[in-house]
Amino acid sequence: MMGSKAAIFATAVLVVLFAAPALAQKSSPPAPAPVSLPPSPAPAPAPHYVDLAELLSVAGPFHTFLNYLEKTNVIETFQSQANNTKVGITIFVPKDSAFAALKSSTFSNLTSDQLKTLLLYHAFPKFYSLSEFKNLSSLNPVNTFAGSPYTLDLTDDMGTIYVQSMWSKPKIASSVYATNPVAIYALNKVLLPMQLFSKDPPLAPAPAPAPESGASDAPSPSAGKTGGLTGGKGDSTSAAHNIGTVGVANSLLVAAAGCLMLLW
């Protein structure tokens, strides 16, 4: 009897030991499936900034204007505004010939601050396309980068845009670059505000005319005079020769007449 109980107890212990791992597997929750995360978005590309100095150096000839911009550090002011893509900038750039047409003292007599103001006077602190100038002309005068009272008047004459300062009214000769936020337009004249120039600046002296090509072909007075003297000497020699010939002929005639008289 005691042996049967011990055998039954031993069997029960073995059943519990073998069944415990299976029960543990059934009771434990299943492992979660791996979660696939969406790929992270690529970083936004850096904004493209227009290098004003490089653009003006190759799109010219704008070398004089660019030299003044770099000399006064106004190029940095313009570049900072150009990098502001929400507002932008509009620059009126005179060609080298526009500066050459004015007397050199026009700009050399300006102080550094005045020269800086003159350059700022050639820009609007906002981007304007050519199509926007027609509406902008109704808001004349328009403030420039130099601030009040340095303003410009814009005129749209059947599609031709004129930019008027006190002493000049050039038209926009061409669009050098016009993609938001930067607009650059070429001018054939320098914009001259009354606040810096109390009167119309003088023009550069005209170049001396080239000598005429036919001037060297004209006979010199000395040549004519020499020729005249030579001609006169030749004529007197010829006349003396003619007189001598006539004298000899007369002598022969007299001699012949004398011989005839002797024979007679």
Image (cartoon, rainbow, N blue to C red):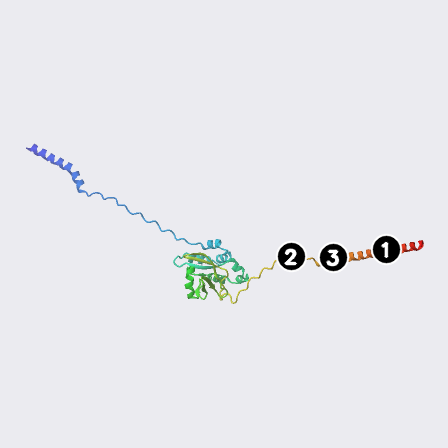
Asked if marks 1 and 2 touch (Cβ < 8 Å), the reply is: no
> Mark 2 highlights which residue?
214
Identify which residue, 140 or 45, lies in the foreground: 140
Q: Residue at x 46, y 54 (%)?
A: 55
Q: Is residue 58 above or below residue 164?
A: above
**Residue 95 image point, x, y percent:** 50, 58
> Mark 1 highlights which residue?
249
Q: In what element is the residue under mark 2? A: helix
Other-residue count near label 1 (Cα within 10 Å), few / some / many at <14 / 14–19 / ≥20: few
Q: Residue at x 9, y 34 (%)?
A: 8
Asked if marks 3 and 1 touch (Cβ < 8 Å), the reply is: no
**Residue 17 image point, x, y percent:** 15, 37
Q: In what element is the residue under mark 3? A: helix
Indicate the amino acid at tag 3.
Answer: Gly
Indicate the amino acid at tag 1.
Answer: Ala
Q: Residue at x 91, y 54 (%)?
A: 260
The residues tagged by marks 3 and 2 sit, at their Cα atoms, a distance apart of 22 Å
| Upstream in sequence: badge 3 or badge 1 | 3
| Upstream in sequence: badge 3 or badge 2 | 2
**Residue 186 image point, x, y percent:** 48, 58
| Upstream in sequence: badge 1 or badge 2 | 2
